[in-house]
C-alpha cells in the first residue's frame, strides 16, 4: 500500500472512530468518566491495530532483502531460503489480533522458520 492509500485508510479509520464516539455519547449522556474512557480505548484499539498492521506490511522491512542482503538464520548465520508469503498473527498491546502477510524463510541447516527481520 502506498502512502496516499495509507493516508486515506487511516483518515477513514479516524473518522469512523470520531463519528462512532459522537454517536455513542449521544446514546449514553449519563456515562461515567470510566465508561467513556473504556469506549474511547476500544475505538482507538481498533484503529491502532489497523494502523499497526498496515504500517508493518507497507514498510520496506516487509520485503525479503534487508539492506540488499539475504537475511540469515540468527542461530546458524546461514542464508534463509525464501518460502513465499505467509500470514503471521500478532497481538497488539491493546489486545487486538492483527494478521500480517510477510515473506517467510526457512533455515536450511536448523530448519527454523523465520519472518525476517524477526
Ligand atoms: Zn539455522
Image (cartoon, rainbow, N blue to C red):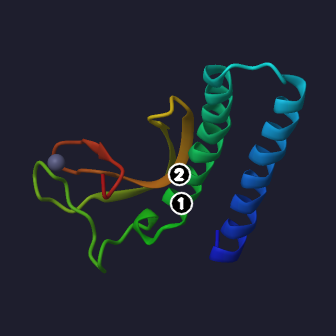
Instruction: Report x, y in % for residue 20.
Output: 82, 39
Residue at image location 70% in from the left, 76% down from the top: 4
Q: What numbered label is drawn on residue 91?
A: none
- Name the image quarter holding the N terminus: bottom right
Establish if 105 lies above or below 20: below
Outermost residue toward the bottom? 68
Assess mark 2: CB under 8 A from ligand 1? Answer: no
Q: What numbered label is drawn on residue 52?
A: 2
Nearer-the-camera pick, 84 or 37: 37
* Residue matched to label 1: 55
Left-right relation of 74 to 48 = left
Instruction: Give the CA distance from mark 2 to mark 1.
Output: 5 Å
Q: Residues within 10 Å of mark 1 (few under 14, many from 20)?
A: some
Residue at image location 31% in from the left, 58% down from the top: 117
Q: Are marks 2 and 1 in contact (CB under 8 Å)?
A: yes
Nearer-the-camera pick, 28 or 42: 28
Left-right relation of 52 to 80 = right
Q: Residues within 10 Å of mark 2 (few under 14, many from 20)?
A: some
Instruction: Classify mark 2: helix, strand or loop.
Output: helix
Amino acid at each position: 500500500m502506498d502512502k496516499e492509500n495509507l493516508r486515506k485508510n487511516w483518515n477513514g479509520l479516524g473518522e469512523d472512530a470520531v463519528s462512532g464516539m459522537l454517536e455513542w455519547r449521544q446514546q449514553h449522556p449519563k456515562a461515567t468518566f470510566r465508561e467513556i474512557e473504556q469506549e474511547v480505548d476500544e475505538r482507538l484499539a481498533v484503529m491502532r491495530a489497523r494502523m499497526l498492521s498496515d504500517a508493518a506490511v507497507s514498510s520496506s522491512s516487509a520485503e525479503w532483502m534487508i539492506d540488499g542482503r539475504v537475511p540469515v538464520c540468527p542461530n546458524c548465520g546461514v542464508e534463509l531460503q525464501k518460502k513465499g508469503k505467509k500470514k503471521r498473527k500478532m497481538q497488539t498491546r491493546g489486545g487486538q489480533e492483527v494478521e500480517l502477510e510477510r515473506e517467510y524463510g526457512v533455515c536450511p541447516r536448523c530448519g527454523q522458520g523465520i519472518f525476517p527481520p524477526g
